[in-house]
Image: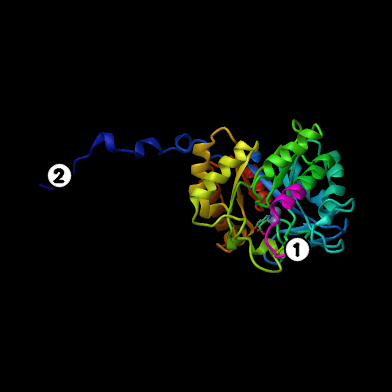
Amino acid sequence: MNQLFLSAEHVLQGGYFHSTLRKLQEPNTSIEAHNIMYPVFLLEDDNLIQPVASMPNVCRYGLHPLISHLEELVDKGLNSILIFGIVTALPKDASGSSADCPENPVLKALPKLRAKFPNLLIACDVCLCPYTSHGHCGLLTPNGAIDHAASVRRIAEVALAYAKAGAQIVAPSDMMDNRIKAIKDALVSCKLQNTVSVLSYSCKFASAMYGPFRDTMKSAPMEGDRKCYQLPPGSAGLAARAAARDVAEGADFLMVKPGLPYLDIVRQTKDKYPYHPLFIYQVSGEYAMICRCGDSSEVQTILMETLTSMRRAGADCIITYFAPLILNMINKKQ
Ligand SMILES: NCc1[nH]cc(CCC(=O)O)c1CC(=O)O
Ligand SMILES: [Zn+2]
Ligand SMILES: [Zn+2]
């Protein structure tokens, strides 16, 4: 007998033949402006603009060209940025003193950016690696190990300086244990706890995908690597414990970084902490890879599918160098 049996209860296609039906089948995966945070590299020289060789269409900006760049994006709906300071003229030393000296580009820019863009949400990356002579994210003991207590004190000091200068989110990416509590305590001591939030890079892995970023920031460690503080890529367990610890210490938001290779960590973190908005960082290496995926229309389709997968895995906000392109795509769709 050659008869084909159609089984009504097994037909799925009846549920997604129309684009509106397909939207209903993809809950919580839409990409809107508030789901995107744009990382920007800020130079000391107010008038300089420099392309980043390893990242097509990404530049490092001094304050004035940054303002022009952001004006256009804010007009297109940009909601939030994450600032990384870069120094070349200011000295790098063992304690990263340029991270919060009065001439630090981030500290100088914050009041101006806040005044210029009153509705833009401004986050600052907090770390010592762009400012230390050894290039590590914390401070070192004389024998080259991480000095835990001194590192946490210093990170909290720098976070507080950015908060006082106008950062609305401080985002420590250093991965020193207990920094979230130290930062929260510092904010409380200056009555800033209700106007500044803490975005913890809680699940940040020791990834090979930070390469283009380290070139850009000139922040690669002079000696050794970051495997004693960034998480081992295979460890879902440490990621769970780090998230739990940061929640207990008062983190407002959690993060998984890099993005695409760690979507299982996004899902486990969201399932465990559904009430903490979860960020995902599509890092520089992911950006460079997607840029090479084909012509501009292929890149856009692949990018959207990738962003959708991040939302589906449980990410609420995606930190991405593609923000300008995404805003164009969102605006065209409407
Ligand atoms: N504090 C270091 C830091 N802050 C942001 C990134 C990576 C961002 C990217 O690759 O886009 C890194 C990684 C690192 O060098 O260890
Ligand atoms: Zn660092
Ligand atoms: Zn950092």
Residue 219 coordinates in the image, percent (x, y): 72, 62
Q: Residue furthest left?
A: 1
Q: For the C terminus, which image quadrant?
A: top right
Q: Quadrant location of ligand 2?
A: bottom right
Would you say the residues marked 1 and 2 are in contact, meaning their CB atoms lie under 8 Å apart?
Answer: no
Is 154 above or below relative to 14? below
- The residue located at (84%, 42%) in the rendering is 165
Q: Which residue is mark 2?
A: 3
Q: Does residue 145 show up magenta in the picture?
A: yes
Quadrant of residue 274 in the image?
A: top right
Of marks 1 and 2, the one in the foreground? 1
* Residue 78 visible in the current orientation: no
In the visual, does 196 lie left or right of 229? Answer: right
Q: Residue at x 87, y 44 (%)?
A: 112
Q: Identify the residue under disc 1.
A: 51
Q: Residue furthest front?
A: 142
Q: Which amino acid, mark 1?
A: Pro
- Res 204 seen here: yes
Secondary structure beneath dot 1 equals strand
Q: Residues within 10 Å of mark 2 (few under 14, many from 20)?
A: few
Magenta part of the chain: 143-155
- CA–CA distance between discs 1 and 2? 65 Å
Q: x%, y% of residue 234?
A: 49, 56
Kind of residue indicated by mark 2: Gln
- Residue 112 vs residue 69, the one in the foreground: 112
Q: Seen from this angle, which residue lies furthest bottom?
A: 223
Q: Assign a secondary structure to mark 2.
A: loop
